[in-house]
Structures are given as C-alpha cells and as structure tokens.
Amino acid sequence: MDALLYWVGLVAVAVNALTGVMDSGRKQMDLIGALLVGVATALGGGTIRDLLLDRNVFWVVDQTYLIVALATGLLSFFAIRRRPLLPRLFLIPDAFGLALFTIIGTQIALQWHAPWLVASLMGVITGVVGGVLRDILCNDVPLVFLQGELYATAAWAGALALIGMQEIGISPVISAWAGMAIVLALRLLAMRYHLTLPALRPPTG
C-alpha cells in the first residue's frame, strides 16, 4: 500500500502542477509566476494536511515531489504558452487531481491513526487546498467556495467510501481505487449535469 501511495502521490503532484500552470495561462503569467502557481497547487493541500497531523511535510522529507512539481510546471509552461486554451479546460485534470489527492490524504491520515471523521476531512483538505491556492494566486474566487458543481462534496464522498470499505474488510488497495473512482465520477458528473448543493438565498421583500 505504501508503494501505491507513493507513486499515486507523484502522479497527483504532476497533475495538479499541470492544472496550476494551465490556469495561470489565462492570466498571462510569466514563467516564474506560472511555476509558483503550479507548485502551490501541487504541494499546498498535502502541506496543510501534514502540518495539521503534526507530520513531517512530505515534500521536505522527499524532494522528489518538489522536483516533479517543478519539472511538470516547466514542461507545461512551454507546451501551452503559445496555444489558446478553453477557459474551463483545466477542470478535467483538476478532477483527476482532486480524486488522487483526496484518497492519498485520507489513507495517510488513517495510517497516522486519525479518527475516521478527521481522516475523511484530511482527505478533503488534501484534495481541495491546492486548488484554493491556485485560484487565489490567479485572483479568482476559489472553486470550492462558489455556488457551482459539486467539488468538496465529491471529495468527501470518496473519502468516506474508502473508510467505509476498509471498515468492512475490503483491502486498502481496492478501497483506494474505488474511492478515487467515486470522487472522479461525482466530479465529472457534476460538471456534465451541473449537480449542485442547495445554496443560501438573500431574503427578499
């Protein structure tokens, strides 16, 4: 399971770095700006998770994560810098990054002996905080705070599903893949069919 978490973590870092650079392209950022957004998107959620769990920050312990984030950001910048991008194109890799990081965060919290509710929220934090930092650095309202398609809800559902499956004896590996699939499916379905939660409305009259 540890080997799976490690490699999935590297893929998640690369995917999120890509989304950060893609989103920075809308703001016409230079190389340094795009790299900053990419690295913050890739490493931000896991950093907050580790600090809350009083755990050594993952990319400080193993700089491979930082190298992957920087390399992916650099390659992405030169690959897309002269290509017109659709405004919401980054949302597809963002959905994959959300799924990957949510399950990694949940599983790490469980291994750290966090209670199940805390572990599920650590998964959500790992999944969404990178995107929050990306949107803030791009001077946008974070997706997770907007009235729009399911985002953090999809992450939480997948995290709870992973925990529930492990509680009934399903192997951690199968639970992890199933949890990822649930997050990804919910997020993509929400984007396709505009699935939302109820929102507060200002009083009228």
Image (cartoon, rainbow, N blue to C red):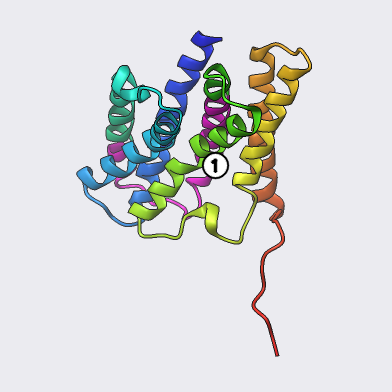
> From the image, which quarter does the N terminus lie in?
top right
Decide which of 162, 70 is in the foreground and name it.
162
Residue found at x 72% / y 29%: 161
Query: What's the amino acid at mark 1?
Result: Ile
Above/below status of 174 relative to 91 = above
Residue found at x 41% / y 36%: 48
Question: Which SS type dominates the magenta stretch?
Answer: helix
Asked if the stretch drawn in magenta spans residue 91, the answer is yes
Residue found at x 20% / y 43%: 32
Q: Position of residue 136 (x, y in %)?
A: 38, 54
> From the image, which quarter does the C terminus lie in?
bottom right
Above/below status of 20 relative to 14 = below
Count neighbours of disc 1 (C-alpha within 10 A) and say few if under 14, some if 14 to 19, many if 20 or more.
Answer: some
Q: Position of residue 130 (x, y in %)?
A: 43, 41
Decide which of 76, 103 is in the foreground and name it.
103
Above/below status of 21 relative to 175 = below
Q: Which element carries disc 1, helix, strand or loop?
A: helix
Residue 49 sits in quarter: top left
Residue found at x 38% / y 43%: 20
Magenta residues span: 77-106
Mark 1 — residue?
A: 92
Residue 42 sits in quarter: top left
Residue 121 sits in quarter: top right
Decide which of 87, 101 is in the foreground and name it.
101
Q: Position of residue 82 (x, y in %)?
A: 30, 47
- Lateral position of residue 105 relative to residue 198, left or right: left
Q: Position of residue 77 (x, y in %)?
A: 29, 40
